[in-house]
């Protein structure tokens, strides 16, 4: 039934044990393949989904998860010979409407709502209740209120979606799916933009949907979420089905081995020396912007990786941006290696050697239609240019080629369009641009958001190397295992202030996920 | 969960917000009216004290002239509102107006079919608009390019139909719409107001209306929700063309004539200005038809008031342009302030 290459045999798991749990199989993929030209995206993948289960699908970027999900959503047509069975009969899904008719809904990573419309209008988008073309608004609003109440939310059905937070928007998408009788929900990286607390609420909602018999296919790069939630975990690698683990078989080492064929223990790097007190190479004093950031001071020692943790909205990105000169600050002083740096714009910051990797690489970082080489060279074309403004193309090619090699950016050529790369490779290309500028202080804002394990590992390698080369590296991240794994010291922000500090050094509050959460959420435990 | 997800904020209710946006420019309209009342009075008598009472701007007769002058632009701007709400643009309405008026007049001169003049105007506009729509929706060409092309091509058609001459029909069958009044209100004004009400109904009360806003707000989401995007696009460009055709009929009725070179020249710019003055977002998704009405009235008041106060033709252009920019800047400032508080 499935084709396995020899290398996979060791990690193969029996998938038939699913039957023993007694739940009904409502969706089954049999021998699903997809080839684009000569590239094989999926090779004879077989997988089944039971009602009322949370089924995680993992694998590195490019493993075929998105292609498989696009096939289920009707956005991609599989190769001939592929079979999809739903509710015991074979079906063809050739358009998004077919998927909807089968009760399959995707909660998109890039949210698919109209921000200008109300919650109720979005829930009924494309299937508005009407009498002869005239919209029946009162009924749509009333039913929207019902479904929101059922999901335990108090979002106003008349509120414009643009006024909602990201987690509320996600809830609206889920409500839309549930309201239109979806039996199978596909969630693609739903927690990347959520804070810890919002993530917990989403998980509670997922458990409720599971109890109602809805099957959830859950795609996430965050391993701890996969362990916490899943009834079963299936792994894809290079377009092939590797295996499915039952609840009692799920453990981090097995999954990572199945995904990448290497052990977890070597994953995080923290080889830089921090035991001896080192001189301060970067410090900021009393940074405020009058709104989201109040009186933040900190310093980075030589050879140290500093983390900044906090809930979404705690002011972490805002702090980095005012240091970088991207936003106006009302007070604050910056020193690099003991010398005062006057920074009022990103241009000043770059000249002083302060660089900032944005959290939103697609919107604020990369030029998606431009080539890998152009993106990498963007910061240095000026200094490389000859005779007052002529591009030095050979130098550019040289730089791009070296970067691609050094950061293992997977691209067919340095002249490929950067928008065509996977998320991880895009991120590495953006990081390469910053590295070309010889940073002395490097802010990395969510450097591994939404990227695969291989690319994460490459980025950790760069962070480690920068720290060894005495660059002050400051990592802003919402992924606590990452902060604990790569940082020597972590500042925890809360409501625009630095609320606490945890670290490896003796005498400090120990650097653990629990301590970070405790500091980050203290404000909530005091509020009514 | 409940405490955190609560967004029960009556101020952010969309109905309230859109009302606020719609009437955002109304104070400017009223202010302009008062300014012109004062200066026309001042110019008349030279006395500051009695300038307001002597002013000629606020009189039933003058206001009805203003409304009639605004009517054709209002109709064009209503169609433009549909298009801009989807994130598109229609540069061809002035040319479509000319071609429609031209064909309508030509048909009205045919011995046996003269009664079809009005219908010909509408039909011509609709066909040309749907052509724009088909190019945008099915060939996926950028609206700016498509309608820039038809701006030129349709202008050429208008001249071709008439062999590049002015067509004149003193016995035009539907001329009454341009020259008669209904209970004292010019029929042109009645037509324009009806167009606004019908447009409001389509945009705010029908499924199609929601889909137009949805398309402008997030076209990918609209597509994923199963909305037939090409049909919505065909509708908005068709509507814009149809209303340009209606505008053609209104022009022909008022003038009894049409000239392929001059008629409707740069009308598209006034229509776009009215829509933007009315607070509709240039990238689509937000805006209202009442705002467009206020925008069209501002432009008409400016034109009328500047003539009334004796400002020279050259300065009229300069002042009009600056007022448009200033009004929109003021509106942005005001909206940013409400968003912050």
Image (cartoon, helix red, strand yellow):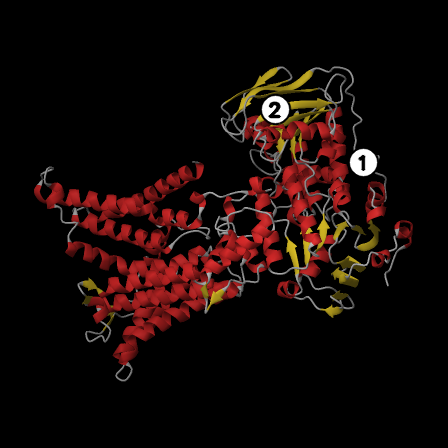
Observer-nearest of A397 and A377? A377
The chain that hosts pointer 1 is A
Give how far across and how far down residue B127 sits, in percent: 41, 71
| Figure check: A31 above or below B329 | below
Residue lying at 90% horizontally and 51% vertically, measured from the top left: A7
Q: Nearer the viewer, mark 1 or mark 2?
A: 2
Give how far across and how far down residue B170 sits, in percent: 19, 74
Q: Residues within 10 Å of mark 2 (few under 14, many from 20)?
A: many
Q: Quadrant of the C terminus of chain A?
A: top right
* Spatial CA span between label 1 and label 2: 29 Å
Q: Secondary structure at mark 1?
A: loop
The residue that mark 1 highlights is A267
Observer-nearest of A484 and A283? A484
Does residue B215 appear in this view? no
Contact? badges 1 and 2 (CB < 8 Å): no
Nearer-N-terminus badge (1/2) = 1
Q: Which label belongs to residue A498?
A: 2
Q: Is residue B197 left or right of residue A179?
A: left
Does residue A311 appear in this view? yes
- Quadrant in the picture for residue B35: top left
Give how far across and how far down residue A347 sits, in percent: 55, 29
Q: Is residue B217 left or right of residue B114?
A: right
Whether labels 1 and 2 share one chain: yes
- Quadrant in the picture for residue A437: top right
Q: Quadrant of the N terminus of chain A?
A: bottom right
Residue lying at 72% horizontally and 37% vertically, measured from the top left: A403
Q: Secondary structure at mark 2?
A: strand
Q: Is residue A51 left or right of residue A336?
A: right
Number of numbered discs overlaid on the protein picture: 2
Observer-nearest of B120 and A388? B120
| Figure check: A237 above or below B123 | above
Give how far across and how far down residue A47 sits, in percent: 79, 58
């Amino acid at each position: 039934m499935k084709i396995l290459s020899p290398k996979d045999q060791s990690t193969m798991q029996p998938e038939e044990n699913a039957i023993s749990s007694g739940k009904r199989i409502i969706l089954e993929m049999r021998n699903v393949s997809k080839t684009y030209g000569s590239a094989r995206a999926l090779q004879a993948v077989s997988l089944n989904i039971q009602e009322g289960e949370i089924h995680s699908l993992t694998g590195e970027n490019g493993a075929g998860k998105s292609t498989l999900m696009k096939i289920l959503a009707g956005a991609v047509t599989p190769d001939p010979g592929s079979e999809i069975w739903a509710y015991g009969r074979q079906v063809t899904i050739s358009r998004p409407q077919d998927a909807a008719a089968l009760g399959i809904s995707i909660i998109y990573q890039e949210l698919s709502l109209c921000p200008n419309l109300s919650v109720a209008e979005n829930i009924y988008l494309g299937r508005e209740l009407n009498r002869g073309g005239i919209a029946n608004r009162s009924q749509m609003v009333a039913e929207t209120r019902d479904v929101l109440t059922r999901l335990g939310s108090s979002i106003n059905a008349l509120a414009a979606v643009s006024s909602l937070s990201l987690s509320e928007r996600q809830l609206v998408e889920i409500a839309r799916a549930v309201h239109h009788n979806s039996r199978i929900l596909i969630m693609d990286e739903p927690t990347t933009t959520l804070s810890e607390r919002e993530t917990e609420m989403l998980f509670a909602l997922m458990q409720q949907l599971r109890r109602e018999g809805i099957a959830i296919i859950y795609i996430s790069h965050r391993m701890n979420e996969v362990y916490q939630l899943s009834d079963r975990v299936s792994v894809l690698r290079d377009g092939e089905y590797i295996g499915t683990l039952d609840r009692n078989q799920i453990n981090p080492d097995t999954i990572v081995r199945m995904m990448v064929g290497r052990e977890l223990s070597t994953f995080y790097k923290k080889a830089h020396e921090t035991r001896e007190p080192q001189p301060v190479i970067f410090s900021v004093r009393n940074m405020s912007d009058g709104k989201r950031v109040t009186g933040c001071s900190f310093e980075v020692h030589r050879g140290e990786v500093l983390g900044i943790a906090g809930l979404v909205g705690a002011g972490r990105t805002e702090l980095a941006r005012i240091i970088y000169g991207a936003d106006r600050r009302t007070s604050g002083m910056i020193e690099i290696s003991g010398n005062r740096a006057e920074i009022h714009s990103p241009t000043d910051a770059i000249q002083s050697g302060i660089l900032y990797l944005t959290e939103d690489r697609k919107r604020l970082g990369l030029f998606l239609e431009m080539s890998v080489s152009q993106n990498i060279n963007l910061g240095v074309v000026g200094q490389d240019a000859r005779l007052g403004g002529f591009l030095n193309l050979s130098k550019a090619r040289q730089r791009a080629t070296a970067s691609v090699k050094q950061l293992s950016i997977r691209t067919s050529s340095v002249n490929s369009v950067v928008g065509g790369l996977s998320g991880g490779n895009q991120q590495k290309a953006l990081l390469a641009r910053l590295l070309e500028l010889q940073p002395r202080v490097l802010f990395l804002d969510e450097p591994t958001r939404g990227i695969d394990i291989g690319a994460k590992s490459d980025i950790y390698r760069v962070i480690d190397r920068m720290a060894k080369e005495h660059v002050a590296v400051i990592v802003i991240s919402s992924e606590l295992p990452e902060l604990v794994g790569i940082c020597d010291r972590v500042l925890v922000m809360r409501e625009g202030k630095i609320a606490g500090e945890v670290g490896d050094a003796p005498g400090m509050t120990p650097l653990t996920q629990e301590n970070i959460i405790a500091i980050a959420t203290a404000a909530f435990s005091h509020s009514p | 969960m409940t405490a955190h997800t609560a967004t029960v904020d009556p101020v952010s209710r969309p109905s309230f917000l859109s009302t606020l946006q719609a009437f955002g420019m109304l104070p400017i309209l009223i202010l302009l009216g008062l300014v012109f009342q004062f200066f026309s009075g001042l110019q008349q008598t030279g006395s500051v004290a009695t300038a307001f009472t002597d002013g000629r701007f606020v009189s039933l007769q003058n206001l009805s002239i203003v409304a009639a002058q605004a009517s054709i632009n209002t109709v064009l701007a209503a169609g433009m509102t549909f298009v801009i709400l989807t994130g598109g643009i229609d540069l061809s309405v002035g040319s479509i107006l000319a071609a429609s008026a031209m064909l309508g007049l030509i048909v009205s001169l045919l011995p046996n079919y003269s009664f079809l003049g009005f219908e010909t105007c509408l039909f011509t506009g609709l066909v040309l608009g749907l052509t724009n729509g088909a190019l945008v929706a099915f060939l996926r060409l950028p609206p700016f390019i498509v309608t820039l092309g038809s701006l030129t091509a349709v202008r050429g058609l208008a001249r071709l139909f008439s062999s590049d001459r002015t067509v004149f029909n003193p016995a035009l069958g539907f001329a009454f719409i341009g020259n008669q009044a209904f209970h004292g209100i010019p029929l042109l004004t009645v037509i324009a107001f009806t167009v606004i009400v019908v447009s409001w109904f389509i945009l705010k009360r029908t499924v199609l209306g929601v889909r137009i806003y949805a398309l402008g707000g997030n076209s990918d989401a609209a597509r994923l929700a199963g909305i037939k995007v090409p049909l919505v696009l065909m509708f908005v460009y068709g509507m814009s063309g149809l209303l340009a055709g209606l505008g053609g009929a209104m022009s022909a009725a008022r003038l009894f004539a049409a000239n392929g070179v001059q008629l409707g020249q740069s009308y598209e710019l006034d229509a776009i200005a009215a829509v933007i003055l009315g607070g509709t977002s240039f990238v689509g998704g937000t805006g209202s038809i009442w705002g467009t009405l206020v925008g069209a009235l501002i432009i008409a008041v400016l034109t009328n008031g500047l003539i009334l106060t004796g400002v020279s033709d050259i300065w009229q252009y300069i002042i009009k342009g600056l007022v448009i920019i200033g009004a929109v800047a003021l509106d942005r400032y005001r909206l940013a302030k409400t968003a912050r508080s």
